[in-house]
Amino acid sequence: MNTWAASVLTLYPEMFPGPLGMSLHGRALEQEIWSLEALNIRDQATDRHATVDDQPFGGGPGMVMRPDIVDLALREAVNQVDDQRPIIYLTPRGCPLDQARVRDLADGPGAILLCGRFEGVDQRVLDAWRAEDVSVGDYVLSGGEPAALVLLDAVVRLLPGVLGAAESLTEESFESGLLEYPQYTRPASWTDRQGNERLVPDVLTSGHHGRVEQWRSEQAEQITRERRPDLWQRYAKQDEEGQE
Ligand code: ADE
């Protein structure tokens, strides 16, 4: 079995594995389904003050991570000559991460994740290493670390042996191109704190498998249409093409 290898370059290595040391991901780490190495970028600093950043050329607020220091950190991560892992720089400026890219990454040997702080990383070192810019959403985090945790969470759960049959992937959001239908469990009648009795939709307790499937796909379509017109358009187009 090949271990999926993650190397994270960060100024805060203590943030790893963090939540990924628990539950399914933690067990998979122990079982060596994946490995995680958190490298401290500051270890590559060459001066007495362990400087990793400097002011931006052209002026402006904040500090930029120095290309020479980040380069040394990347060399440390890429220790084998035939390291095929993509280098991913987490930035709100990156291409949005989606389930298709997550699946691709899970099919590969691993990833080298570069976490920026401050105003970002000098562009030259990103160009020189052909880093792929990836964003986890249209909002700004204080650094790439939580984004790296998000990416790793999404990838690792797809690795063979991480999810049991109980946590099957087949009916998940995005796997079909639609958001997921709502779920219900016992008790069938539940009273909320306003005293309203809330029942489970009849169809789910009907025992009629075909009608359940029909109801679920209608719900998935409706929720996707309302919440994510972008996903809905893509789905509807694929459906049309499928019928041609
Ligand atoms: N760093 C800061 N914000 C980020 C985001 N939204 N995605 C990825 N990396 C980030």
Image (cartoon, rainbow, N blue to C red):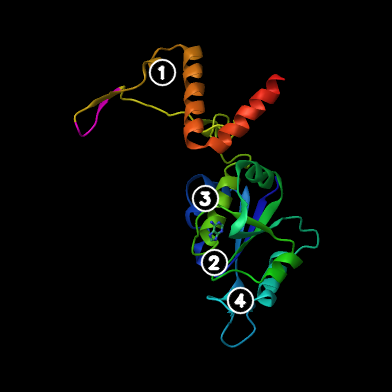
In the visual, does 122 lie left or right of 203?
right
Mark pair 2, 3: CA separation: 17 Å
Q: Which residue is mark 2?
A: 13
Task: Of the two numbered discs 3 and 1 on the same chain, state the one appearing first in sequence.
Answer: 3
Q: Specify the label residue 43 is tagged with.
A: 4
**What secondary structure is marked by label 3?**
helix
Q: Residue at x 51, y 22 (%)?
A: 217
Task: Of the two numbered discs 2 and 3 on the same chain, state the one appearing first in sequence.
Answer: 2
Q: Residue at x 55, y 35 (%)?
A: 164
Image location (x, y in percent) of residue 209: 49, 14
The reply to whether dot 2 and dot 3 touch (C-beta < 8 Å) is: no
Magenta stretch: give its range: 189-194
Mark pair 2, 1: CA separation: 47 Å
Given residues 2 and 146, the one toward you in this image is 146
Task: Of the two numbered discs 3 and 4 on the same chain, state the one appearing first in sequence.
Answer: 3
* Residue type, label 3: Gly
Given residues 6 and 1, the one toward you in this image is 6
Circle nearer the viewer, 3 or 1? 1
Mark pair 3, 1: CA separation: 35 Å
Given residues 95 and 61, the one toward you in this image is 61
The reply to whether residue 171 is in sight is yes
Q: Quadrant of ligand 1?
A: bottom right
Q: Which residue is mark 3?
A: 26
Q: Quadrant of residue 235?
A: top right
The reply to whether dot 4 and dot 1 touch (C-beta < 8 Å) is: no
